Image (spheres, grey):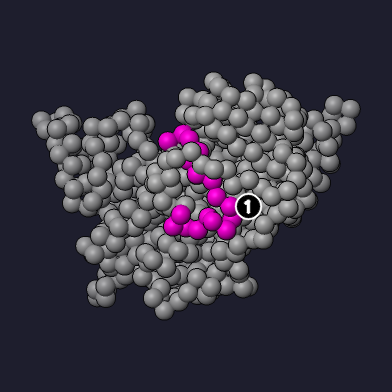
Amino acid sequence: MTRQRADDGTAVELRGITKRFPGTLANDAVDLTVRRGEIHALMGENGAGKSTLMSVLYGMERPDAGTIRVEGREAVFASPGAAMAAGLGMVHQSFKLFDSLTVAENVVFAAEPRRFGLVDRAAARRRVRELAEEHGLAVDPEARVGDLPVGLRQRVEILKLLHRGARTLILDEPTAVLTPAEADALFAVLKSLAAQGRSVILVTHKLREVLEGSDRVTVLRDGRVVARLITAETSADEIAAAMTGRAVELDRIHAPGTPGEVVLDVAGLGTDAVHAVDLTVRAGEIVGIAGVAGNGQSELVEALAGLRPVTAGRVALAGQDVTHASAAERRTRGLAYVPEDRHAVGTAPAASVADNLAMGHHRTSLSTRGMLPPAAVRAHARRLVERFGVKASTPEVPASALSGGNLQKLLIGRELAHEAPLLLVEQPTRGVDIGAIQNIHDQLIAYRDAGHAVLLVSAELSEIRGLADRVLVMYEGRVTASYTKQEADERTLGLAMAGGALTDPAPAEAVD
């Protein structure tokens, strides 16, 4: 039975939401109020209870205690379908789209306009075009979704919700896979939706986006609400302290390293997406690669890791030619690799945390006469879980049970533990909370200072500027600029990333 009360401008109200899992109190009497026409940020470290709370609101989990009200009506959602019928919609981190279908077919799927009992495809295309124009979500209704970049796929997800009449939109880490330009475009859309009276619940770790794009902030820590803030009256430092329970040094610029011998030497490298790339990385140095997504950074790293064929040029690792060596051979010769896609490439989600942490170590430090002693695997896992703050109930749980941020900590920890001369690392802190970001940055600097070479690719300019001793910029598959740490300010890098440095770069070489 539902009960309605007087309209006070509240879109969603959660009261006393409690949710337990075996061994974990995920939400502890959480209250959350979201008003109509506002962007409300929900923040907290990995494992703070954000995703669980949104799963309860969206009908994916049943609360053990507490009540939900949507637009004044008390509701019990047995499924996401019931939540959608009440005017809620959710965009997950992993998009729920059919790559083989068009934009229009995805948007209207299971809610198709019909004529004479048949799906009216022309009406579907018109509907999507009208929604896209109305809300500033430009996308071709006839485009195949599998051919679209990530930013446009996210627009398709939002159009799906609007087509179904969603009045409150829940977005889970919406900018984790977006370029800065795509993120800015998304926030313009969200502000437009809020101005029309819709509400947005934004689950994110990114302080800059929260400060620029939200109206109010609720912070969770260890399953409880620890702060309710008005965005215009707070600061990044206050939010970070509420999330972590301690003062956090944000956007720290680390001191430069002391470069030694060349570890990675790349000359004239070419692939299907990379053209005539020259670069070096020395021991005791972090070289950062900046660029808008899609300009060859990922393809370059895949070629260096042995995952993409090299069509021209030469790659040398610690003085050995590895141009056509396999990925396994490169690992043997001293390469560690943190890929951008932690799910499909970096880990085996169905395997346990302990087994994932053993990968790559199973032929070396953990092997005894060709065998893997289970006790050694568990001890190795416990050491890395503690060192990198991976929140897992036991090392035996599958990696798929971890949040995205904790899976990233697992991956970073495993690769750093190899102590390889060269580390290739892409997007090291994507989807990771503030406290963990600081820890990962400190670990990468310590790795550099121990005499290792690091090649870093990141979409976060603050991360590149904070960590890198030298910065290379890629544009349309080429390295078009090279800067020292002192030269690499945001304006200079932004201009180069937009194609404003198309002359051959004069290499900013390390000083011996």
For label 1, the residue is: 469
Q: Give the crowd class for mark 1: few <14, some 14-19, many >=20 residues within 10 Å.
A: many
Residue 105: x percent and y percent? Answer: 26, 34
Disc 1 on helix, strand or loop? Answer: loop
Residue at the image position 11 percent from the left and 33 percent from the top: 115
The extreme bottom residue here reads 233
Looking at the rendered structure, the kind of residue marked 1 is Asp
Taking the image as shown, residue 508 lies to the left or right of residue 121, namely right
Q: Residue at the spot x=47%, y=52% of the render?
A: 493
Q: State the extent of the magenta-drawn residues as a range.
A: 476-492
Q: Total of numbered circles in the picture?
A: 1
In this view, the residue in front, 501 or 302, is 501
Task: State left or right for residue 123 relative to residue 389.
Answer: left
Q: Quadrant of the N terminus?
A: bottom left
- Left or right: where 151 falls relative to 448: left
Q: Position of residue 277 (x, y in %)?
A: 54, 32
Percent across and percent down for residue 485 are 59, 55
When asked about the image quadrant of residue 372, the answer is top right
Residue sitting at x 64%, y 28%: 315
